[in-house]
Image (spheres, grey):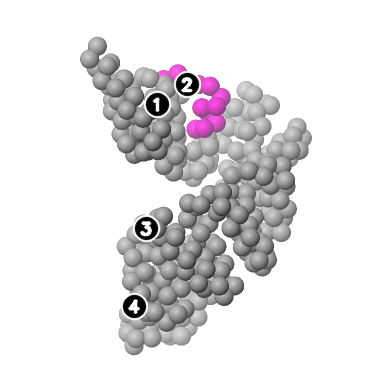
Amino acid sequence: MNQWMDAEHHAQMAQQFLEAGEWRKALNALRAALDLSPHRTEWQLGLAMTHEALGEPLQAADAYQRAIDIGADDLETQLRLTHNLIQAGHCLRAIARLEVITATIPSCEEAYCQQILAYAKLGDHAMARVMFDIVMQTDEHNARAYDFMAHSFAARQQFDIALRLWEKTYELEPAYPDVLANLGQAYVKVGRLGRARKLLRRHLRVQPEDVDAMVVLGRLLIAMDRHAEADETFRIAAELSPSSAPVHLALGELAMLHGHLDAAEARFRRALSLAAGCAGARLGLAMIAWDEGQRQEAKSLLIAEAACDGHSPAQLLKLCGMMMRVGLA
């Protein structure tokens, strides 16, 4: 009886933490409750949703799977599981489950929509289009399908088509999550910087703590020679997320543009301390080292930079230019 009461106490504490937005404390309280009473599906689902709120899709998927194993076999829980599997990069596992769902419930549009995104992430854009067409046969006004198909075209650098699809998403559902941010980033890619800036600012009025969007906006502002606005944007992002490597990288690049090499070096080193594979940080340090006459150090940094993943085209061009400059053609 005492163990049951202790478990209930932890669950009640978790609810209070959730209402206060204290996700980590809620997570710990739910774990304590489940350690004492592991077969409570509502607590397992609460654990899964808390992991989601913390941006931990793989842990959320594991929690949803445990909830299903102990009896929460409703469709919504299954779809939350597959959604988080896709977000965690386990797309094949998600597709296998989604195919079971559509075989059982052929009218489940959400299962087809999720497969659009899963196939797009796998690079199988032909199958993504097949899933999109299936949804369109029954619902030409499905904003989620248009959004996921837009991601498929964006992954192929076909931003003109992606734009049309995201515009359709916005037309159907103006409050659709991140649609303004996606439109803004796509307009950057097609060179319509003024339009991109307006959309990103509108997005940030709705989601003022979206640090990723702030980094995109800041880089856009640099391209538009609005350096003071860019600096303000990056510094707000740094206050919101002091452990964001992309923010420190961006601040370092902006400092370099103004010739503040000591400040730039400090930002690049901070970015690397937060993310050892941060694309662009070693490039910045190499440029500083070269200008300071540290030739061998610059070469070593450039070789290490070339081994990183995730460079933007602009970073790759700058990296190639520096490598030729130092004799690493």
Q: Residues within 10 Å of mark 4 (few under 14, many from 20)?
A: few
Outermost residue, top side: 1
Amino acid type assigned to the residue bearing label 1 in the image? Gln
Amino acid type assigned to the residue bearing label 3 in the image? Pro
For mark 2, give the secondary structure: loop
Is 70 covered by the magenta stretch?
Answer: yes
Q: Is residue 84 left or right of residue 265?
A: right
* Real-space Cα separation, disc 3 to disc 1, in angstroms: 31 Å
Q: Residues within 10 Å of mark 1 (few under 14, many from 20)?
A: many
Q: Quadrant of residue 75?
A: top right
Q: Position of residue 63 (x, y in %)?
A: 41, 31
Q: Which residue is mark 4?
A: 262
Which residue sits at x=52%, y=73%?
Answer: 227
Q: Which residue is mark 1?
A: 44
For mark 3, give the secondary structure: loop
> Is mark 2 in CB contact (under 8 Å) with mark 3?
no
Mark toward the viewer: 2 or 3? 3
Q: Position of residue 38 (x, y in %)?
A: 33, 22
Which is nearer the N-term, disc 2 or disc 1? 1
Q: Which residue is mark 2?
A: 72
Judging depth in this view, the residue of 268 and 260 nearest the camera is 260
Amino acid type assigned to the residue bearing label 2 in the image? Ala
Which is nearer the N-term, disc 2 or disc 3? 2
- The correct choice, above or below, for 324 with respect to 235 in the image is below
* Real-space Cα separation, disc 2 to disc 1, in angstroms: 9 Å
Mark seen at residue 242: 3
Which is nearer the N-term, disc 4 or disc 1? 1
> Is mark 2 in CB contact (under 8 Å) with mark 4?
no
> Is mark 4 in CB contact (under 8 Å) with mark 3?
no
Which is nearer the N-term, disc 2 or disc 4? 2
